[in-house]
Image (cartoon, rainbow, N blue to C red):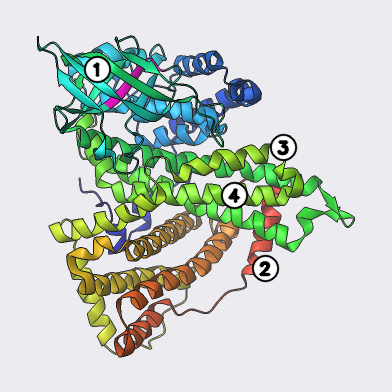
Amino acid sequence: MSFIKGGSFLINETEIKDVFTPEDFSDEQRQMAELTRKFMENEVVGKVKELESKNWDLTVNLIKKAGELGLLSFDIPEEFGGLGLDKTTSILVSEQISMQGSFAVSFGAHTSIGSLPIVYFGTKEQKEKYLPKIATGEIICAYALTEANSGSDALAAKAKAVLSSDGKNYILNGTKMWISNGGFADLFIVFAKVDGDKFTAFIVERNFPGVSSGQEEHKMGLNGSSTTTLILEDAIVPVENVLGEIGKGHKIAFNILNVGRFKLGAGSLGGAKNIIPVAIKYAKERKQFNKSISEFGLIKHKIAEMGIKAYATESMVYRTSGLIDKYIETLDKNNPNDVLKAIEEFAVEASIMKVYGSEILGYCADEAVQIFGGYGYSEEYPVSRFYRDARINRIFEGTNEINRMLITGMLLKRAMSGHLPLVQAGMKIMEEVMSLPSFEEEEETLLSTEKKLVSNSKKAILLVAGVAIQKYMMKVNDEQEIMASIADAIMEVYAMESALLRTLKIVEKRGEEKSQLHIDATKVFINDSIKKVENYCKNVLAACSSGDDLRIQLAALRRFTKHLPINTIELRRKIADRLIEDEKYCF
């Protein structure tokens, strides 16, 4: 069975049948999502004040209740007490859990970065010892990578591990920062350098001698999640608790961050979708100048834009989970290493999900505050909390700046290794640029203009990436502004194409009339995104070329990004009217 390679969306045309969408969820997936939603509504959402007062006993009890429902065990293999479900179900749960930001962090620290290192890299003995208790919540996990002077540069960590004289234990010394669940976790995945240079992961229990937590951090948001330092003072860790190989801790750290980004994208999507009905309800109730502010054009613009951006992000998130699940089908799904290999294959898409999702969440939170006006700035209304809680997502799991560098860097690395034929695709684009443009009129079909814009956007990116590489060669990785602009264009293309393919698939199933909301959203999104792609590409060309070369390249770029604008005001009003009528995200 073949699979689509990660990053290949940039050079290949994807068939509608190869795209997984939310409309393709199985009954089992929908049931798991509903189970999670009810748990959040019945057990968590009404306890926000208690959670934000740092009642960790409540948080621990809620995690255990989630364990009783099986919500902690979907990524844990069945032989170790888990459910071993597909990745789409896993991120569906992540999306629903995001209904309350603080608890979502506590939950995610346990089920994702805290426990998956053992799932993917643990020995059989380690898995048998820890995973069944992790699945029920008897053991709660945390992840300890960051240090005061090694934020994005995790490998610069100073925490040290030295083998004891009897060879039975490692003695760990150092301090880790920003540990989610730090105040109550029973188990920590800790990274330290054996003999000061071999970066290695360890499974560290709270009750090991020399292990303690610092005071709770006073954070901008997520006040209902525990964040502390982890202090290791001659901490005694048995040699059997080394996780993976000595000196290979970077493999664990980076691969687990890929998973974390993948899930954070889904969680950010869930957060954005939860904000929309709150903003709509208030807009309908708030009266100014003798009418509801939801009737005002600029408020409709905000509501429509929140829905459109969430639709594109949702399309992208589940397209990616579908790709990962399809790849896993070609491997041994009971082999954690094979599952990890599938997630690693789509590391580019995972970073895109993380960056795009977190920035859409930030946009929705900001616009919700604006719709609430002065009340949005008051702690008496929920949107101020949404705003504060959302901000960290652009920093979690590697900052968005780092992830932008990773998106372009990973694609270039795959091109150089021959894993993706990006160089060949780029050369083909240069040949097209040098040839006379075709003036043949193509047959107009539903969204054919948008389809052409998506295809041309890919060509534009390949064009400017080729120009950048020609100028800087292997040093292009040092040109961060150029790398980030290319990444921004790539993200827009992945979102544009994901929304387009999903909409076309919906039309195939339901017909055009019943799919009008999706069609309108796709038209608006692509109309606006093509302008962004053009601007990002212009920035790169202007940084790499000048004079006649720049003029020729800009002329080529215009061939790919030229389009007639559509009446987005009218379409946004239609979309907003539907969202306002339904009082929720209704795609």
Q: Which residue is mark 3?
A: 381
User: For residue 10, what is the image quadrant?
Assistant: bottom left
For the magenta stretch, what is the residue range? 185-190
Q: Which residue is mark 1?
A: 127
Residue 130: quadrant of the picture:
top left
- Mark toward the viewer: 1 or 3: 3
Residue 73 placement, left or right of 526: left
Q: Nearer the viewer, mark 4 or mark 3?
A: 3
Kindly indicate the quadrant of the structure image that contains residue 293.
bottom right
CB contact under 8 Å: marks 2 and 1:
no
Residue 137: image location, x then y, percent? 42, 15
Asked whether 203 falls inside the magenta stretch, the response is: no
Work out how far the residue at label 3 is from the one at label 2, CA to CA, in angstroms.
31 Å
Which sits earlier in the primary sequence, circle 4 or circle 3? 4
User: Residue at coordinates 37% horizontally, 23% vertically from top-left?
Assistant: 230
Residue beneath label 4, please?
364
Of discs 3 and 2, which sits in the foreground? 3
Which disc number belongs to residue 570?
2
- The answer to if 187 sits in the magenta stretch is yes
Q: Secondary structure at mark 4?
A: helix
3 or 2: tag closer to the N-terminus: 3
Q: Which comes before the other along the chain, label 2 or label 4?
A: 4
Mark 2 neighbour class, 10 Å CA radius: few under 14, some 14 to 19, many 20 or more? some
Measured from the top left, where is residue 425 in percent x and y? 22, 69
Residue plotted at (18% across, 63% down): 421
For label 2, the SS is: helix
The image shows residue 314, relative to residue 433, as above or below, that is above
